[in-house]
Image (cartoon, rainbow, N blue to C red):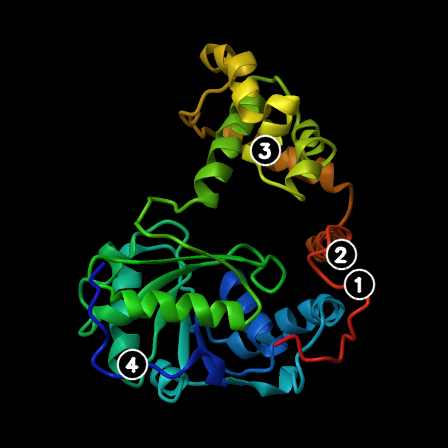
Amino acid sequence: MTTTAPTTPLPAPEDVRRVACVGAGVIGGGWVAHFLARGYDVTAWDPAPDVAQKLRRLVDAAWPALTLLGLAGGASPDRLTVTATLEQAVGEAEFVQESAPEKLDLKRDLLARIDAAAPPGVVIASSTSGYPMTDMQTTAADPSRLVVGHPFNPPYLIPLVEVVGGERTDAAAVAWASRFYEVAGKSVITMDREVPGFIANRLQEALWREALHMVANGEATVRDIDASITEGPGLRWAVMGPMLTFALAGGEGGMAHMLDHFGPSLKSPWTRLQAPELDRELYEAVVAGCDEAADGRSIADLVAERDRGVIDVLRATGRLDATSDPKGDPR
């Protein structure tokens, strides 16, 4: 990243009142719900013909969980405006969140269009789950204001967002985006360099690949794999991450003792990080296993169950004030 400041002064993150969301899928819609719950005016655009109805359904489904989390003063689903064009959505925005499908050419073209239509100085963030901003900002007239703001599904519920710029991104834009997300109620990791897949996705991908190997080889069912995390290490990871969790495995000696004791097992054939061939048999086994694990619950049922569970964990671990007034302004 460069260290030069943008030519146009950025508005203070605390002063932002209007956010534009481009893309209204699961991630984009989740961002819409999050920003509405934080009291922002939100303009949204997506080329799908039924985008307004789709967004309303998504926001309505998320609102009970957002109410439990605590709504900002003035927060309302009625502060959403779905526009007919991208230019209308971003023309008066003070921050833009792009959440288009993961296709590099599409991302490049869309970010260039947003850059051309958004007011000068406004930071534009991409929700990409893997592309480096360096590869996406190549056709924008002002790449200095383009950053990655990588959320986790659903963005209205999971606090984390990873922020990083590309080779042509100004450091000031990255710092501004990180501060804005914090003001908007997110937990932010500001990365100082581009890493393919960022941080959390790299860790998720390793677990996902091993899970696929186990299903492919008949070593575990989908239900077994999920239970092994939700009833095992996932409970610890909700409090502290894998590194500190392993440090505790070393007792009073900490990580040093843990590495001395368990380090040799790193050479044991416990994991196979290369992805298995996703043939039709494995594909159908994974899909059928998920259907079995759902046990008749619809996707809407599972979403509601997930939302309640995450909120309970956030409260139980002190990351959400269980006594807070849900009508108060968390900003």
Q: Residue at image x 80%, y 63%?
A: 322
Q: Is residue 116 left or right of residue 32?
A: left
Give the number of the mark in front: 1 or 3: 1
Q: Quadrant of residue 137?
A: bottom left
Q: Secondary structure at mark 4?
A: loop
Three-letter amino acid code at the position of disc 2: Arg
Q: Residue at image x 40%, y 25%?
A: 274
Three-letter amino acid code at the position of disc 4: Gly
Q: Disc 1 to disc 2, how far (Cα)? A: 6 Å
Q: Which residue is labeled 3 in the image?
A: 286
Q: Which residue is labeled 4 in the image?
A: 121
Q: Quadrant of the N terminus?
A: bottom left
Residue 313 seen:
yes
For residue 245, the mark is: none
For residue 315, the mark is: 2
Q: Which of the two discs, 4 and 2, labels the residue nearer the N terminus?
A: 4
Q: Secondary structure at mark 1?
A: loop
Q: Secondary structure at mark 2?
A: helix
Three-letter amino acid code at the position of disc 3: Val
Q: Quadrant of residue 275?
A: top left
Q: Which of the two discs, 4 and 3, labels the residue nearer the N terminus?
A: 4
Q: Disc 2 to disc 3, how far (Cα)? A: 32 Å
Give the number of the mark in front: 2 or 3: 2
Q: Between residues 14 and 62, which one lies in front from this camera angle?
A: 14
| Disc 2: CA contacts within 10 A as few (<14), some (14-19) or many (>=20) | some
Furthest toward the front, the residue is 252
Q: Could you tell me if the residues under marks 4 and 1 are in contact, i.e. CB atoms within 8 Å? A: no
Q: Which residue is labeled 1 in the image?
A: 322
Q: Secondary structure at mark 3?
A: helix
Indicate whether 216 appears above or below 36. Answer: above
Indicate whether 172 appears above or below 72. Answer: above
